[in-house]
Image: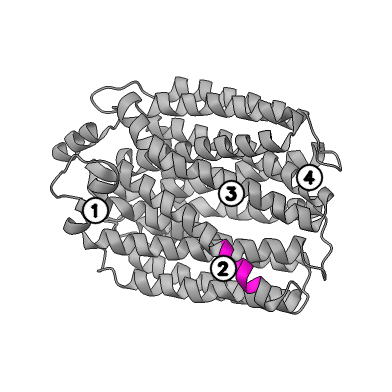
Amino acid sequence: MSGPSHGTPGLRGFVRSLGHSPGLGRLLAVRLTSQITDGVFQAALFASILFNPERHADPLAVAGGLAVLLLPYSLIGPFAGALLDHWDRRNVLVYANIIRATMIGLVAVAIATGASDTIVLIGALAVTGASRFVASGLSAGLPHVAHRDVIVGTNALFTTLGAGMLAVGAGIAAVLRAVFGPDNTGSAMTTLGGVVIALIAATLAHGFAHLQLGPDEPDDPGRSAVHAVTVGLLHGIRAVAHSPTVSAALSAIGAHRLVFGMNTLMLLVLTKHAGSGDGLVGIGVVAGFTAGGAFLAAVVTPVAVARAGRRATLVVALLVGAIAEISLLGLHPIVIGIAAFVLGLIGQVAKLCGDVAMQVDIDDAVRGQVFSVQDAIFNIAYVGAVTLAAVLVPTDGRSALLPVLGTVLYLIGAVVVRLLHTPPGPDHGSFSDDRIEANGRRS
């Protein structure tokens, strides 16, 4: 995106950018409504399966079902993501939100009629796929409405507010659940709340001008959408392989997702073993600490990247994550809360650094495909970790092996980032605001 540079990071730079790009505010509105939709749906789905008196799902069975159901999307996602670089991203956001609303409605019907958990999870898979499509489209389109000199701060602000909206969505689901009840009918009515908000997001996305979010030039211009999908994975992987900064960031994200998947399964079994009431409270508390860490990441990341560069920021984050993970050996409630906060922090730091790498270091023509490769890493790493943990975790959830394994994964991730990431130089600097501004003037 062309335009004046302000050299001001964070909130002030974002506010100034709003004056030069009204589309930035609209993109934020789409992001926030999309996150609320995710919050409502995820909370409603989780409560309807695990804490519904009319259902008695074993969390290990649910984890195994999610692993089987998410793998196909993980393999197909990179191909479908090529459409973000072939079609008008505005239209992709509109139709993906409409599809998401439709699928949420179908999931609600499945819950209301007492359909099996497998049927419900298949519907949830489709909703998740549409949600990730929306998220990738928003990230790929951001450089078209945000000046490069404030892109780190804008990403941090978007992520902070987005995490808050996930909590808002979960709160909405909790209120609806209190009104309509915890049974199948009440769970279905709660789930339907996501339909309305997804349609609002679609309406907001429709307000963008034609091709305002790109792509400026479609990947392989003149070729069909079928061709774009066919070569999407190849082009995405090739772009990642040619960008050491992106490869390093995705390695950090993958390491964190592996640990996150194992910790999630362990927490799920621990809380289920504690009983429904205590389980819900425990999950809520841990989620709150994790969200708090993610909020802090929005403040810490722009400063760390500006002063130390992305490579040092990622390596330190993973090393801190290793310390937090090994502290979980005793499974003390207070330590779990502190570790959740730290892991939420470092996970979000990795995600923010990855987003900046893909938005700044990747050509617009293949940016959507690279974000889809990231989505595949997200899901495959999570699925693999959940599956492994489901095999290793004892029935009460108290495992010493999983925290040790998670610590090793963080340390390996730190080494890989250190080896892959190109040192600061003419083309791959730390991407402080000054560096981004200079790059913006050259482009």
Q: Which residue is mark 4?
A: 270
How has the structure been colored for display?
Answer: one colour
Q: Is residue 321 above or below residue 97?
A: above
Range of residues picked out in magenta = 170-177
Q: Amino acid at mark 4?
A: Leu
Q: Amino acid at mark 2?
A: Ile
Dot 2 or dot 1: first in sequence order is 1
User: What mark, if any, has residue 288 been given in the picture?
Assistant: 3
Task: Tell me, yes or no, whether the two marked residues, 2 and 1, touch with CB atoms within 8 Å.
Answer: no
Is disc 4 placed on a helix, strand or loop?
A: helix
Q: Amino acid at mark 1?
A: Val
The answer to whether one can see residue 110 in this image is: no
Residue at (54% x, 58% y) in the render = 167
Q: Residues within 10 Å of mark 1 (few under 14, many from 20)?
A: some
CA gap, disc 4 and disc 1: 44 Å
Task: Tell me, yes or no, whether the two marked residues, 3 and 2, touch with CB atoms within 8 Å.
Answer: no
Q: Position of residue 333 (x, y in %)?
A: 72, 38
Dot 3 or dot 1: first in sequence order is 1
Q: Is residue 300 above or below residue 151?
A: above
Dot 2 or dot 4: first in sequence order is 2
Is disc 2 placed on a helix, strand or loop?
A: helix
Q: Position of residue 143 (x, y in %)?
A: 28, 50
User: What mark, if any, has residue 15 been given in the picture?
Assistant: 1
Q: Which residue is mark 2?
A: 172
The answer to whether one can see residue 262 in this image is: yes
CA gap, disc 3 and disc 2: 15 Å
Q: Residues within 10 Å of mark 4 (few under 14, many from 20)?
A: many
Q: Is residue 134 above or below residue 234?
A: below
Dot 4 or dot 1: first in sequence order is 1
Residue at (56% x, 68% y) in the render = 172
Q: Nearer the viewer, residue 22 or 177?
A: 177
CA gap, disc 3 and disc 4: 17 Å
